[in-house]
């Protein structure tokens, strides 16, 4: 399922990551969804801090590693999501974790 990288109910733009594991890895067919207020068709995407896609779709499957952010007028710029192309990665659930939580880790080779 989808997992926001900001607290639920925040009035800011969020990037949802599917599958909901961090760090995100390219070979996992990661889909990013930009969630926030604003008018349909006004999603602006940035890749590696460079303007990348004007009036892009709300969501897409990542095909290149890099650091992605999106902008929705009315709620601003999202926190960044980095998609790696590493061959070995230890992943944690893409959700807020607190000390004492039980966590399932994924080690992918």
Image (cartoon, rainbow, N blue to C red):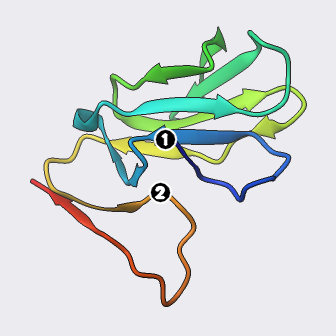
Q: Which residue is mark 1?
A: 17
Q: Residue at x 41, y 36 (%)?
A: 66
Query: Can you tell which mark lies on residue 50?
Result: none
Residue appearing at x 73%, y 29% in the figure: 71
Question: For residue 94, which numbered disc appears in the image?
Answer: 2
Left or right: 25, with 93 as reference point: left
Location of residue 75 with respect to 87 vertically, above or below: above
Q: Position of residue 12 (x, y in %)?
A: 80, 45
> In this view of the protein, which residue sits in the foreground, 9 or 38?
9
Crowding near the residue tagged with mark 1, few <14, some 14–19, many ≥20 C-alpha atoms within 10 Å: many
Res 85 → quadrant: top left
Circle 2 packing at 10 Å, graded few (<14), some (14-19), many (20+), is some
Q: Residue furthest front?
A: 1
102 versus 92 height, above or below: below
In the rendered view, tell whether residue 18 sits above or below residue 109: above
State the SS at label 2. loop
Using the numbered discs, state the Cα–Cα distance from disc 1 to disc 2 in whole angstroms: 8 Å
Q: Is residue 49 visible?
A: no
Residue 56 image point, x, y percent:
62, 12
Expressed as whole percent of the image width and height from the top left, the position of residue 27 reads 22, 35
Q: Which of the 4 image quarters holds residue 96?
A: bottom right
Residue sitting nearer the eye, 62 or 47 = 62
């Amino acid at each position: 399922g989808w997992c926001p990288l900001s607290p639920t109910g925040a009035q800011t733009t969020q990037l949802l990551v599917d599958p909901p594991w961090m760090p995100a890895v390219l070979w996992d067919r990661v889909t990013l969804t930009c969630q926030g207020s604003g008018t349909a068709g006004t999603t602006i995407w940035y890749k590696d801090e460079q303007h990348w896609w004007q009036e892009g779709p709300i969501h897409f499957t990542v095909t290149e590693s890099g650091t992605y952010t999106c902008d929705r007028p009315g709620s601003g710029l999202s926190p960044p999501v980095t998609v790696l192309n590493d061959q070995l990665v230890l992943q944690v659930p893409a959700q807020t974790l607190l000390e004492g939580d039980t966590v399932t880790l994924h080690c992918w080779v």
